[in-house]
Amino acid sequence: MITSDEVEEVIFHALEALNADLDPKDQIAISLATPLFGSDAAIDSLGFVSLIVDVETALIVDHELTISLADDFAASRTQSPYSTVETLRDYILTLAAGQ
Amino acid sequence: MELLGQYVALRPLRVDDAALTLGWRQSDRATLLNRGATSVAEQAAWIASRPNTELNFVIQLRSGQPVGMLSLVNIDQINRRAEPARFLIGDPDLVKGLPVAVEAMKLLYELVFDQLELHRVYGTVVADNRLMVKWQKFLGMKEEGRLREHYMIGGRYRDAICVGMMEDEYRTVALPRMKALIGTTIGDNPVEPGGFHDHQ
């Protein structure tokens, strides 16, 4: 079973990869509280999709965990799983526990 | 033809959008697009001369604030295909926190597959534009090839990635993902019936 620390590491690495594609003035400060998508986020739609793609890929390649982070289940959640790194981590752990 | 979404609308590009759209096209964000017109008069002439195989839109918030542009070009009713093109969010500050880009693409794909009843969309993306390549693939496009040194941008040749998506891939891959991204945003930012955020 993937751990909370491992999921955080996957997300942080994906954010670091995103920063590598962004201009210096658009760099994302990386922490558990980093807003990912929504009114407080500094990441635009293209950046957010890049993040999701990299996280899904790393979960498959590094942890043999095949999950979809953007589907009807995600949309049905009362709180958006994309609000912050922390909510995305918790959402991934929920999906992993269901497998 | 105007296409209405929950956050944005696509309305036809008009000649009097020339100054606005020229400014977007000449911004740093459009570095990896073809430069095109260099004056408002040229841009106006270009808009006026669009052929009937194209549908060109301004992306606007439901308040009426224009924020970007998006086109459907090379509409081919015989082979039932078309090419999404000229996708640009011109004013990123106005769309911060809103799924504007996602919903604009969803509206265009609904036009393609539900109204025009086409079979396929396709296009090319500058290979260096890694975020756009990921974006297109995440939203259902599959890589179909690579055109070497296809574009001259910024003084050097750049490869193009060819992408395409069939109707069934749109319905099974792209549409659920777009709905998820739009739906989760709505969860955080409730929209009153008939009212929309125009700025976050």
Image (cartoon, rainbow, N blue to C red):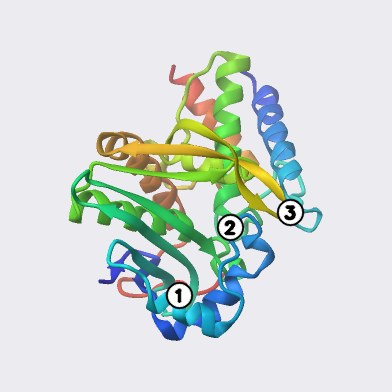
Indicate the secondary structure of the residue bearing disc 3.
loop
Residue assigned mark 1? B46
The vertical placement of A64 against B43, above or below, is above
Chain bearing mark 2: B
Which of the pair A3/B79 is nearer the observer? Answer: B79
Chain bearing mark 1: B
Residue B75, quarter of picture: bottom left
Report how far apart the C-alphas of labels 3 and 1 lie in the structure: 24 Å
Labels 2 and 1 in the same subunit: yes
Quadrant placement of the N terminus of chain B? bottom left
Residue assigned mark 3? B155
The answer to whether residue B139 is left or right of residue B34 is left
The image position of residue A70, as x and y in percent, is 44, 38
Which of the pair B124/A21 is nearer the observer? Answer: B124
Q: Is residue B195 visible?
A: yes
Quadrant placement of the C terminus of chain B? bottom right
